[in-house]
Amino acid sequence: MVLSAEFIPASADSLLSEFSERAADLGVVVERVADSDEAAARIRRFGTELDVERVAVSAELIAAAPSLKLGLDRRNLAAEVPDDAARVREAPFGASLGLAGIAETGSILLAEASLPDRAIGMLVAVQVIVCRTATLVPSLDQAAALLRALAARPGGAYATLVTGPSRTADIERVLTVGVQGPARLIVLFVDELS
């Protein structure tokens, strides 16, 4: 029996390559690291480039990757979990947990449970989204099952597909980046997130 290309599972490398190609067209920085400690080192590097000593980190990311917080602490980058969305307003730099990456669009699925976690993706100037490499899927069709599961949660869920930095244009077609969300987006795929 011959399988069509749509039924042959794609490798993580090929999915990452496709994701990176799509995301690069939108000005997104995409990097792959081996583990949480290496992810912490990259986030620290971005913090150094921005000349900041603090990063607003979603509670969801800390719960999924406590080793990441330890790595940030060791590198003297204060990881602050906001308890109020208003506190995020002053944060130039934030990090969130991506639930899945969609290769065909270069999008990341976010589904934060709390308003302070969602605020990181809406209010910081520079956002790092940390996503497990294993959650990369080829297309939106494959992400649909995850979206259905999120919608079935008690009380529903708030989910967002993020495809690049915030962009808006006025009536004269003048494009502005970062008016209604992060002006710079970085996606870190982590092979072993802990």
Image (spheres, grey):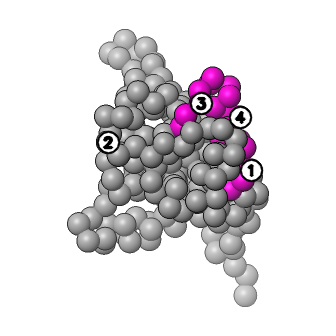
Q: Residue at x 63, y 45 (%)?
A: 73
Picture layout, residue 192 above or below residue 92: below
Q: Image check: 162 left or right of 116?
A: right
Please identify the residue farthest to the left as the structure is shown.
155
Q: Residue at x 57, y 39 (%)?
A: 78
The residue to which callout 1 is attached is: 38
Distance (Cα) linking label 1 and label 2: 29 Å
The residue to which callout 4 is attached is: 45
Name the one closer to the observer, 115 or 16.
115
Q: Which mark is residue 53?
A: 3
Picture layout, residue 176 above or below residue 126: above
The image position of residue 127, as x and y in percent, is 53, 37
Name the one closer to the observer, 131 or 62.
62
Name the one closer to the observer, 113 or 37.
37
Q: Amino acid at mark 2?
A: Asp
Image quadrant where residue 15 sits: bottom right
The image position of residue 1, as x and y in percent, is 73, 87
Distance (Cα) linking label 4 and label 1: 11 Å
Q: Which mark is residue 84?
A: 2
Of the image marks 1 and 2, the number of the one nearer the N terminus: 1
State which mark lies toward you, 1 or 2: 2
Q: Amino acid at mark 4?
A: Arg
Q: Residue at x 45, y 54 (%)?
A: 59
Question: Circle 2 sits in a helix, a strand or a loop, which is it?
Answer: loop
Question: Circle 4 sits in a helix, a strand or a loop, which is it?
Answer: helix
Q: Amino acid at mark 1?
A: Glu
Tell whether label 2 touches label 3 (CB within 8 Å).
no
Tell whether label 3 touches label 4 (CB within 8 Å).
no
